[in-house]
Amino acid sequence: MSKQQKATQIDQAKRFLKMHDDEIRKKFAVEGSAIGYKIKDGKYTDTVALIFYVKKKKTKEELLAEGISPIPEKMEGIPTDVVVMSKGFQPR
């Protein structure tokens, strides 16, 4: 992927978060959000993603039982990643 394509993806993700951050925090009960690279199998990928921070990862069933929507794999075509922040916010 070219630098221009990544820059376009980052800009798209920034616009999305700017417009939807408050509603996302409420609907999905996340502690915070950011833009970064998706982690797969414990390693960073080159995929730009919307990063959502939670205190604890829960199963889809646990979330639904609490009346919370699970975070989808993509939002407006942008991949998502859920990160546990058990010790508070830390640099990735």
Image: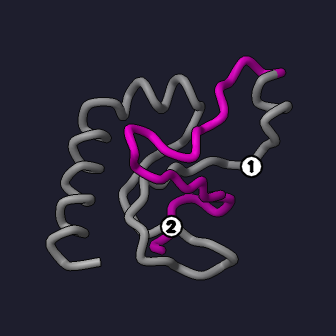
Q: How is the image coloured?
A: one colour
**Marks 1 and 2: which is nearer the front?**
2
Main SS, magenta residues = loop
Q: Residues within 10 Å of mark 2 (few under 14, many from 20)?
A: many
Q: What residue span does the magenta drawing correspond to?
A: 65-92
The answer to which quarter of the image holds residue 81 is: bottom right
**Where is residue 26 drawn, in percent x and y?**
51, 24
Q: Say above or below: 8 vs 43.
A: above
The residue positioned 60% from the left and 38% from the top of the image is 71
| In the image, farthest residue toward the left | 4
**Where is residue 38 drawn, in percent x and y?**
50, 67
Q: Is residue 74 magenta?
A: yes
The answer to which quarter of the image holds residue 1 is: bottom left
Question: Which residue position holds label 2?
Answer: 38
Q: Say above or below: 30 vs 41.
A: above
Q: Amino acid at mark 1?
A: Lys
Residue 85 — which label? none
Q: How many marks?
A: 2
The residue positioned 42% from the left and 24% from the top of the image is 23
- Say whether residue 89 is left or right of residue 67: left
Q: Amino acid at mark 2?
A: Lys
Question: Which residue position holds label 1?
Answer: 57
**Where is residue 11 drawn, in percent x and y?**
19, 54
**Where is residue 48 drawn, in percent x and y?**
38, 64
